[in-house]
Every structure is written in structure tokens, then in C-alpha cells.
């Protein structure tokens, strides 16, 4: 059973530092993910075919835009609107639950990306695996829609059950005195904890699928390296580069997801049991840094996005050069 926490206070300096950090992380996350979205949407506007990989990256970046927005709202809630007598307010609980659901959607999309890499890169020998890989490659659009649909169903189910129960508890408050009203907060916290636990357990099958597909890529890379040594092929093998590029996208996501999810789990006992609001702020900062870091890794590992970055830098340098030359001409 969860119990109510005592009054929690944080100094003004800590709040100011956390606000600056939250603004920086929010700005960086919006910048890098918006860049991925705009580059892929520009191809859609020009009616160029969007590959399955870029389609998954587009959807993944869209979910992370919502993710950064929720984390920034959580930071603002922690700094300004959180009541000292009730640290886990209804609005704060809602933000955390929505974060869990959006994070689950990003995990689904990362799993779709890993399955796509497996179907395109790994050379299967068993006939069933060959047909499965072909099916995944042909049905990637449907898998992405399925991931979005499952997340929407989870959102409706979690929030519907949660707000129905909290609404019933809120209506009961009018018939209770002060001490009974305070005691009624404990069932609300337990209800939130159970909803959080349900969302957490719902990610286990998806995470295991992502872990298994990444493991298959690692095993396939090991076998391919042995084949290269036996045939004395050079380091410029296309299959080797495809393996490495896929693992550079998936392994960092796995590591950052574990860190982010662990920070989310740790933030609850920090707030409710140990009453360390500064620790909760550190956890929120870690949760906001992880998706931004993975977005940067995706940009550096994707050829189309790298070309877009180079084109943007060349355009910025040309604009700067034109401005410098115009200033010189004015001075002359």
C-alpha cells in the first residue's frame, strides 16, 4: 500500500537550474526530432517514395515530439504547480501515465524498425523464417499502423479506467470530513500505482521482441564476419555496413530506453517513499535526455538525414558569406 508523503520543499536555485535544463532539453529534442520529421515530410510533399525505414523514423520522431512536450509539462508541474501537501496531484499522475503510453508507442515503432532490419539484412536458411521475413518486409506499413492503434487502445483503456475511478473517489470527498478526505487520497495513489504497473508490464512483450531481433542481428553479424575471414573479403562489404548501421540504431535505443524507464520507475519511490524531490528532477532530466540522444544517433547514422544536415550547413554558410560580403560593400 502507498502512503501519503510529507511536505516537500526545494530551494529556488535548484528550481531555476532545473528549469534551465528542462528548457535546453526540450529545445534540443524538438529541434532534432522536428528535423527528422520535416526531412521525411518534404519527400512526401515532393511525391517521392518514402522507404519503410524512413516511414518508421517519421512516426518515431512524431511520438517523441509528444514525449518531449509531456516531459516539459512534467518539469513545469514539478517546479510551479505541485502542491506541497499533495506531491502526486491528478495532473501530475495524468502526465506520467501519458508519458508511459507515448513511450510504449515509441518502443513499438523501434521494434518495427528492428524487425525491418532483420527482414532486410539477415539471410535466413529456414523456410518459415524466410516467409516471415518476407511478410514483415511487405507489411511494414500495416505493422506501423498496428503499433499506433495498439497505443491508442492502451491510452483509452488506461485513462478511461483511471478517470472513472478517480471521478468516483472525487464525488465521495463531498460526504467526508477532513481526516477522511486525507485518507481517501491513499486509494487514489494505489489506483495510480496499479495503472502505472499495468502500462509497465504491457511493454514487456514488445521489449523482448526488440531484444530478440537485436540479438539476431548480432548473431548474424558474427556469422558474417566469420564468412568474410574465410573468403578474405575486405572491410567495404555492403552487408557488413548494413549490419553495423542497423546495430548503431538499435543498441543505443535499447540502452537509452532501459535508462529512461529505470529513471521513471525510480522517480515514484523518490517522490512517495523517500520524499526526494530533487531526485525526481534528476530522473525527469534523464528521461528527457534519452530520446534526444537517440534522435541525434539516428541522424548521424542515416545517409539521407546526413545529406540533409550537410545541405543545411552549406546553405547557412552561404547565407553568412553573403551577409559578410554585403557588409563589406556597404563599408567601402
Image: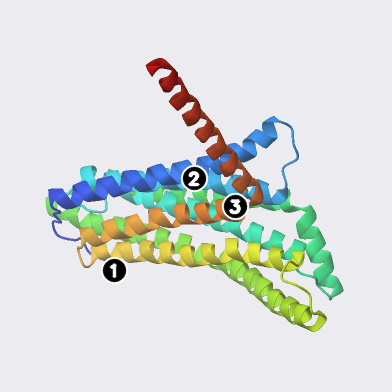
Q: Which residue does the numbered mark 1 point to in the structure image?
A: 1
Nearer-N-terminus badge (1/2): 1
Q: Which residue does the numbered mark 2 point to in the structure image?
A: 32
Tell me: residue 35, above or below residue 265. above
Spatial CA distance of label 1 from label 2 is 41 Å
- Picture mark count: 3
> Which residue occupies 50% across, 25% down?
322
Residue 231, how many percent across, how many down?
A: 82, 80
The answer to whether residue 112 is left or right of residue 280 is right
Tell me: residue 46, above or below residue 179. above
> Which residue occupies 42% across, 22% down?
328
> Which residue occupies 75% across, 76% down?
224
Spatial CA distance of label 3 from label 1 is 30 Å
Q: Nearer the viewer, mark 1 or mark 2?
A: 2
Q: Which residue does the numbered mark 3 point to in the structure image?
A: 150
The answer to whether residue 226 is left or right of residue 178 is right
Q: What secondary structure is found at the residue carrying circle 3?
A: helix
Residue 144, how many percent across, how many down?
A: 66, 50
Q: Quadrant of the N terminus?
A: bottom left
Q: Does residue 85 appear in the picture of this structure?
A: no
Q: Does residue 5 appear in the picture of this structure?
A: yes
Spatial CA distance of label 2 from label 3 is 26 Å
Amino acid at each position: 500500500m502507498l502512503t501519503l508523503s510529507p511536505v516537500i520543499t526545494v530551494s529556488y536555485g535548484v528550481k531555476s537550474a532545473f528549469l534551465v535544463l528542462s528548457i535546453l532539453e526540450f529545445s534540443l529534442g524538438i529541434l532534432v526530432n522536428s528535423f527528422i520529421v520535416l526531412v521525411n515530410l518534404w519527400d512526401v510533399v515532393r511525391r517521392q517514395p518514402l522507404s519503410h525505414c524512413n516511414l518508421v523514423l517519421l512516426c518515431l520522431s512524431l511520438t517523441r515530439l509528444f514525449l518531449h512536450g509531456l516531459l516539459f509539462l512534467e518539469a513545469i508541474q514539478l517546479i510551479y504547480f505541485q502542491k506541497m501537501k499533495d506531491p502526486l496531484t491528478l495532473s501530475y499522475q495524468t502526465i506520467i501515465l501519458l508519458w508511459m503510453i507515448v513511450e510504449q508507442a515509441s518502443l513499438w515503432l523501434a521494434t518495427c524498425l528492428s524487425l525491418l532490419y532483420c527482414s532486410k539484412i539477415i539471410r535466413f536458411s529456414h523456410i518459415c523464417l524466410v516467409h516471415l521475413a518476407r511478410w514483415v518486409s511487405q507489411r511494414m506499413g500495416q505493422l506501423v499502423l498496428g503499433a499506433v492503434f495498439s497505443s491508442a487502445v492502451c491510452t483509452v483503456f488506461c485513462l478511461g479506467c483511471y478517470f472513472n475511478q478517480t471521478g468516483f473517489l472525487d464525488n465521495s470527498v463531498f460526504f467526508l470530513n477532513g481526516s477522511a478526505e486525507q485518507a481517501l487520497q491513499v486509494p487514489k495513489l494505489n489506483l495510480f500505482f496499479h495503472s502505472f504497473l499495468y502500462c509497465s508490464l504491457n511493454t514487456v512483450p514488445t521489449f523482448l521482441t526488440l531484444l530478440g531481433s537485436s540479438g539476431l542481428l548480432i548473431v548474424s553479424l558474427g556469422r558474417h564476419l566469420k564468412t568474410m575471414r574465410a573468403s578474405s573479403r575486405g572491410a567495404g562489404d555492403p552487408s557488413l555496413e548494413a549490419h553495423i548501421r542497423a546495430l548503431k540504431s538499435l543498441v543505443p535505443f535499447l540502452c537509452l530506453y532501459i535508462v529512461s524507464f529505470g529513471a521513471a520507475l525510480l522517480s515514484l519511490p523518490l517522490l512517495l517513499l523517500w520524499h526526494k524531490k530533487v531526485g525526481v528532477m534528476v530522473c525527469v532530466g534523464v528521461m528527457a535526455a534519452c530520446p534526444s540522444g537517440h534522435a541525434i544517433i539516428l541522424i548521424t547514422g542515416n545517409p539521407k538525414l546526413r545529406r540533409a544536415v550537410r545541405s543545411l550547413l552549406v546553405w547557412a554558410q552561404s547565407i553568412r558569406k553573403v551577409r559578410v560580403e554585403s557588409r563589406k560593400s556597404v563599408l567601402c
